[in-house]
């Protein structure tokens, strides 16, 4: 099924996205053939992150779960695939 790694850097104090999301895929899609899929996936992840952060939800476990669920749903609707999704959240102060 492949794997998708999502990395994002968040500011711990302001709860803002500082960098990313960046999406890496392995054994899932060829990036050259799926640029639209990856770009749309970034939008899905960004919207999920912003929704969590707007509620001042600082629980990184919850944020990771929301990212996995929203991206997983998008990929399933788009491709009928179910890759492993690994969100990586880095913090800066």
Image: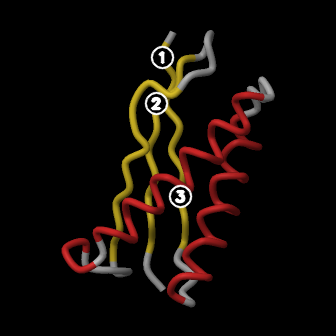
Residue 88 placement, left or right of 71: left
- 10 Å crowding of disc 2: few (<14), some (14-19), many (20+): some
Is label 2 or label 3 in front?
A: 2
Secondary structure under tag 3 reads: strand
**Residue shown at 64% from the left, 60% from the top:** 68
Secondary structure under tag 2 reads: strand
**Residue shown at 62% from the left, 70% from the top:** 72
Q: Position of residue 48 (x, y in %)?
A: 65, 47
- 10 Å crowding of disc 1: few (<14), some (14-19), many (20+): few
Q: Position of residue 89 (x, y in %)?
A: 53, 37
Circle nearer the N terminus (2, 3): 2
Q: Position of residue 30 (x, y in %)?
A: 25, 79
According to the picture, the residue beneath numbered tag 2 turns out to be 9
Measure how far apart labels 2 and 1 are at the Cα level.
7 Å
Q: How is the image coloured?
A: secondary structure
**Residue shown at 55% from the left, 76% from the top:** 75
Residue 80 placement, left or right of 48: left
Q: Position of residue 60 (x, y in %)?
A: 69, 35
* Residue 18, placed above or below residue 65: above
Measure how far apart labels 1 and 3 are at the Cα level.
20 Å
Q: Are marks 2 and 1 in contact (CB under 8 Å)?
A: yes
**Image quadrant assignment for residue 62:** top right
* Residue 25, placed above or below residue 39: below
Q: Are marks 1 and 3 in contact (CB under 8 Å)?
A: no
According to the picture, the residue beneath numbered tag 1 turns out to be 92
Which mark, by number, is residue 86?
A: 3
**Residue shown at 33% from the left, 80% from the top:** 29
* Residue 77, placed above or below residue 90: below
Give the tally of numbered discs.
3
Q: Are marks 2 and 3 in contact (CB under 8 Å)?
A: no
Circle nearer the N terminus (2, 1): 2
The one of 74 and 10 positioned closer to us in this rendering: 74
């Amino acid at each position: 099924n492949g794997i998708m790694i999502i990395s994002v850097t968040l500011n711990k104090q302001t709860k803002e996205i500082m960098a990313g999301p960046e999406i890496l895929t392995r054994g899932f899609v060829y990036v050259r053939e799926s640029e639209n899929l990856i770009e749309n996936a970034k939008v899905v992840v960004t919207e999920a992150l912003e929704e969590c952060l707007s509620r001042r939800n600082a629980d990184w476990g919850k944020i990771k779960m929301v990212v996995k669920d929203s991206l997983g749903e998008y990929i399933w609707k788009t491709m009928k695939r179910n890759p492993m999704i690994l969100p990586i959240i880095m913090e800066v102060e």
